[in-house]
Structures are given as structure tokens and as C-alpha cells.
Image: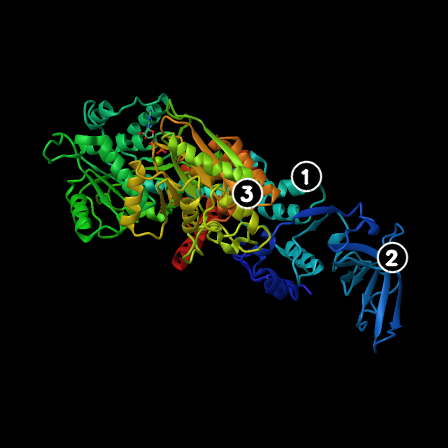
Amino acid sequence: MARHLRPVADDGSDQLDAPLRDIVGKGGPVLEKTRGIRTVGQLLDWLPRSYLDASRPVAFRELPHGEDVVVVGTVVSARTLQMRNRRGRRLVADVSDDAGGVIQLTFFKPWGHEERLRPGAKVVCSGQIGHWRDTLQLTHPDYAVLSAAGSGSGQWLLDGLVPVYTATKGLSPIVHGDSLDLVLHQLQELPDPLPEEVRSSVGLPGLLEAYRLVHRPRTEADHRRGRWRLAFQEAFVVQAQLARARRSADAVPAVPRVAREDGLPHALRQRLPFALTDGQEEVLAEILGDLAREVPMHRLLQGEVGSGKTVLALLAMLAVVEAGGQAALLAPTEVLAAQHHRSMTMLLGPLAEAGMLGGAAEGTRLALLTGSQSTADRREALLDAASGAAGIVVGTHALIQDHVQFADLGMVVVDEQHRFGVEQRDALRAKARAGSSPHVLVMTATPIPRTVAMTVFGDMEISTLRELPQGRRPISSFVVQAERSGWVRRTWERVAEEVRGGGQAYVVCPRIGEVDDADLPGSAQEGPGLPIPPTDQARSAGEDGADLLEVAAAGAGSGIPSLHGVHQVARSLRELAATRDLRIEVLHGRMPAEDKDAVMQAYAAGRVDVLVSTTVIEVGVDVPDATTMVVLDADRFGISQLHQLRGRVGRGGRSGLCLLMTQGQDPEGVARLEQVAATTDGFELARLDLETRQEGDVLGATQSGGRRTLRFLRLARDEDLIVAAHEAAWRTVEADPELAGHPALAAELDRLDQARAAFLERG
Ligand code: ADP
Ligand code: MG
């Protein structure tokens, strides 16, 4: 029976960390083995999935067959029978629900049960409900006899709402419920990370009370109140963490960088072939305002693909250069780094040729630093960064390495920030002059719903570009189901037509093929094989251009796990009548950097018509003549990813076309693609994405800088709560930065820091 909680600290703070074993007796080892639950806190944090109303018990005959159930009833008869064909006896007890329904409990080893299951005994039983002939049965159920005295095992089933937890093999709901009872009865008031004034102003119960409301509610309102409080605490703690991080970042001042009115940014604007949109002007003003301050900028710039973020970043970097500093732009891939370097060099023209013949006197220089450069190129880039000769250094992760130094790093731009972790951003920040912080601008083309922004980027100001520059043409999107051979044929004909009309096409595949592609998205471990076989099973090219689609039909039912691979698709397209005259190249992450760069440049220059690639082109790649995007096995990609891919086309003056091909049979998957096809509003898609994904995926291990799993919060649902928690937490930290008056909150934040440090070490 119940033992006593270990001695607690004066403030009761170690109660939640107390080992469960010591408190709940036999339930302890079972909970540990089945769910990995070792502490009181872990037990309490496993919340019910739903509730049943014990005052309105389900009649037995309505119980769902084959499912795990918990029932309460009275033993009406019990008898031990000799088995006919085998040696041994069996115990059969009939339990009635007092509404005419009867369940038969059967035990093939009656020993020990006969004394307990006497007629008249009130029992709770749990097990998988089955039936034999017309009789409902529970075979070897787990059960407890309720004592008349109203205490002991299973009593919690008898009043209020009965909590139902995710069924767990090997764990009896009765043992689990009894364990919770022991814990809830013995806990003393818990130290509360939520400050008293926050609790009373929002109207929240205390922590222990919240656990009671959730696990032992009397009414629906009870458990909702308890859950809301737990979710609020979670959001509050996250926000307090962000608020403190922001405070400590702000503590190291930045050098204000104010550009002259007629300086470099002005010179670039004179050269641009377009005028900035109103939205761009607004955001630029925000950024320049930040740069002029001594508080380091922490700004997130989000905007649709093609909304013109890069040119703003360039103008801001020039302002820093103009004011005597340097700027670094961190890109997630070599393709993107090279492209930024190329397009910025082009936009800047003579402004990027300082010290060179014909260069503008007031200009600067650009350096490119990537991991795969030749030693000579790298040495030159490193030198230019360290000497300050390069005002702007563009690079990949190579920028972060220890030996990379800057003369005076004033600003860091992180492009497509979701590809980086907080640690990488911090490593780059540390390269500013001792005692100063650089200004930081992070950019993302993945629109972020407000709740995610507050939870992940709550320590940053946010700027949003909502409109695309004038003249951007709309993109039409269609779902192409692979079993409709006519549609598939049209797809490739359309590609050829676009090319003949002066456009270019991307064909994106989920894997490379012909090499070990286990680490690509959508690779084999993700589920059953798709019905289209690899295209290299195609017969040699026919005359009517129907090969790719005939292959599709032929492969149906073959059961071969077969996602389209870059190499096979390129080969098939080179053979297909409709496309064989086109200039087709492949691009994927396993190619040597020079090859990738050469292919990208050839494509950008219009010397390639069709680029068959993996998602290496997902982010940022900007080729104005690309008009068509075909995504094969589109159901294997996430909503945001498809949106990103689609953003690669329609960037010039021509309208874009996006064809999402799928062999998937799953109606939900097809519906998801239809949703992507139906709107190009990135915010709408981000919201959809949020609803269909797990919180963990949304935050991502890298985005949150360590594994910040949300247990109670639902980002798609809890907007009001997150906003309220944000305000309360920032107010609390502002009023008491050291949290001297809030020891429980400080302890909770320390605990999270330690967990994060441990996670990073394991890394
Ligand atoms: P993002 O980085 O947000 O995806 P980019 O900065 O790459 O977008 O811009 C996409 C394209 O649009 C580039 O070719 C860029 O030069 C061009 N562009 C940017 N701003 C404007 C504007 N105001 N008017 C016309 N074209 C623009
Ligand atoms: Mg970009």
C-alpha cells in the first residue's frame, strides 16, 4: 500500500522529481516499463485523452467490440467449471451493469479469483472486449473489487468524470489510476512557476489544483480549467525564457550604423531596375532604424518567396558598410550562397569593385566563402574578411568556423533561417568586435503563423512583406493524378510547350536514385511503396511520347517501393518523344560543388531547358525565365515545402505553372495537394500546415535551439492563451529581471537550460 513521499524541501520543490517507485508501490515498475515514467511529475504530466461520465455509465451492450474498456458492475454469479477437453478448471463470473447487460469474465487459472469475485461484489474491470456466441466477454481481465468503505483500489472510477488515457500495452488502467490517486492524495502544495499576481489576474488555479482538475475532474469545466492552466504555464515559461534571452542579448551593445543620405545604399537604389514597393520601403525603414541604435537589432523578416527580401538585406548591408562596418550573409546551401554572391555582384556592378580598375571609388567588395572552394579562393576570401577589404561576405556554414575573422562585423543576415539553429546564429554573432554585438536580421520565406512566431521568435521584432512586387504573374497550380494517363501525357507536353515559348522548367523528385538515398525526404522507410515503378523500367522510347505514363500504368500493383529518382526521370525525359529534344540536366546535393554551380549557372543563363532535381532548389533559387514546376510524388512533400518549390517559378514577367503529380491513393493526401493548388497565400498555407503537423515538427529541433517539446500547448488552437502568456511573462521579466522574487520560475528556467545543455552535448 501507500508509502510516504520522501522528505521534501521546505518549499516542496522536489516533489515532482521524486521517484515514483517510492510512492506508488507495485505501479511504479509497471509505469516505468510501459511508459518510461519514473517521477511524480512525469506521471502527472501524462494527461487524459478524453473523459467518460461515470454518472451515466455506458450500457454493456453498447461497448465497442475489440476495444479496451473500463467497466463497473456487480458480480451476479460466479462458478468454477471443469474444462472438457483439457485438464484444469476455469472460472466464469457474470457481471451486470444494472441495466440488463451482462459481461462474462473468464479466468483459466481461477486460483485467487474465486474468493474475490463473489456474487454481490462491486467490481471495475478493464480489458479488451470480445464476444463468444452471444455473450460479451473479458478474458483474464484486470479488475479491482471496490470496497464498501469507499476507499482503496478503483474508487476514483465512481464519481465525477472518468479519465481515459492512451491505452498502453501492459499497463492496467486500474493500476495507473490507483497510482495517480496515491500521488494526488499525498502531494503537498507545489511551488508554482506562475507568479501569484499573474495567476490572480488571469484567474488560474494553482499547480496542484490544476493537476487535480485534469486527472480527477467533476465536470467538463473542471478539466478544461486545469488544462488551460497547464498550457498557460507552458507558454509562460517559454516566453519568460525568450524575454530573458533577449535581455541578455541586449546587454551587449551594438555599434550604431548610420549611412549617409547619399552613400552606398543610395547609389545602389539609383542602379536598381525597379522601384521598391511600399511594403519594402516600410520594412527598409524599420531595419535602418534598428541599425542606427545601440541596442542590437534582432529582426525577423518574413515574406513570400519572391517578395524582394534579398534586395532589402543588400541595402541594409550596404548601410553598415557605408558606416564603416562589415556584413555577413549566411546561406543554407552552396547553391544559394553562390547565387546570392552572383546576383548581388550583378546588382552592385561597379559598386562591388572597390580598388579595381573601373570600380566606383566609394564602393566595396564582396567575398564568397564556402566549404568546397579551392584553397586559394578560400584563402583570399578569409583574408578579405579579416582585413576588411570585403564589406560583404557571403557564405555557407563555412562562415561560422573558428578561423574566420572579420575586421569589424557590424551585421549578420541569416537567409532562410529555418535551416539554421540558434547556435549557428550565435557563433556568427560572436565574431563581432569584443564587447559588441552585431545587428542581426534573419529572413524566411516560410510564412509563420502568429503563434509560432511568438513561440519560436518571441525574442525578435518581426517585419512582414505581404505583397509581391508589381508585375509578378500569378502561378496556376494543378494536381495531376498519375493514374490518369492523359493528364500525365499533357504534363510533359506542357513542359515542352513552355520551353518552346521561351520558358524553363524544373522537375523535382523526392530522391536522387541510383545512390544510397536513405536520407532524402520521402525515402523508403516512410510507408508502403507507391504504384509507379522507377522510370528506368520504361521500355525504350516509343514514338508517341507516352512512355512515362504507360510506365505508370504498367507498374500499378507491382508493389515495388518506387519514388521517382532524379537520374531515372532525366533519362526517361531524354527518351520521351515530347521532351527528348529539350536540353535536360540534373542537379542534386551529392554532386561536387563545381558541378552544381556549373549546372545552376547554365540553367540561370538559359542554356538548360529542364532541370531535374531534388529539393536542393527549394530555397531562394531565382531564375526569372523558369515558368514551370513539376513536382513528382508531390504527396511526399510538406505543404510549406511545396509552396517553396512553387515559388521558384513565375518570377520573371511570365505567369507560372505548377503541376503536382501524385501516385498516392490516400484521399487525405490528395486533398492536401488540392489545398496547396487552390491558394498561393503562404499565410493560409502555413495555417493549414500547422493544423496537420505535430507541434514538435513545427518548432523543429534546430529552430528552437534544442528540443523544446510542447506538451500542453497547441499552436494551431491556443492563440489567445499564447498572447496573454507572452504579455504576462515579458512584464514579469521586465519588472524583475533576476527573478529574485520568483524563485519557482527561476528554478523552472534553470531546469530547462540544463535540459537543453544536456541535449546539445548529446548533440
Ligand atoms: P526573396 O528573397 O524574397 O525570395 P528576391 O529578393 O530574390 O525575393 O526577389 C525576387 C526577384 O524580384 C529578384 O529578381 C529581385 O531583383 C526582384 N525584385 C525585388 N524587389 C522588386 C521590386 N520592388 N520590383 C520588381 N522586382 C523586384
Ligand atoms: Mg530569397
Residue corresponding to mark 2? 134
Direction from residue 234 to residue 615 in the image, left or right: left
**Residue at coordinates 35% horizontally, 53% vertically from top-left?**
590
- Nearer to me, 718 or 558: 558
Q: Disc 1 on helix, strand or loop? A: helix
- Most extreme residue toward the bottom, as rendered? 87
Label 1 or label 2, whichever comes before in sequence order: 2
Ligand 1 rendered quadrant: top left
Q: Which residue is mark 3?
A: 482
Residue visible at 18% across and 40% down in the picture? 390
The N terminus: image quadrant: bottom right
Q: Earlier in the sequence, mark 2 or mark 3?
A: 2
As measured in the structure, the alpha-carbon distance from the residue carrying label 1 to the one carrying label 3 is 49 Å
Q: Which residue is mark 1?
A: 221
* Three-letter code for the amino acid on which mark 3 is drawn: Ala
Q: Position of residue 444 (x, y in %)?
A: 39, 37
Mark count: 3
Residue 484 sits above or below residue 258 on the image: below
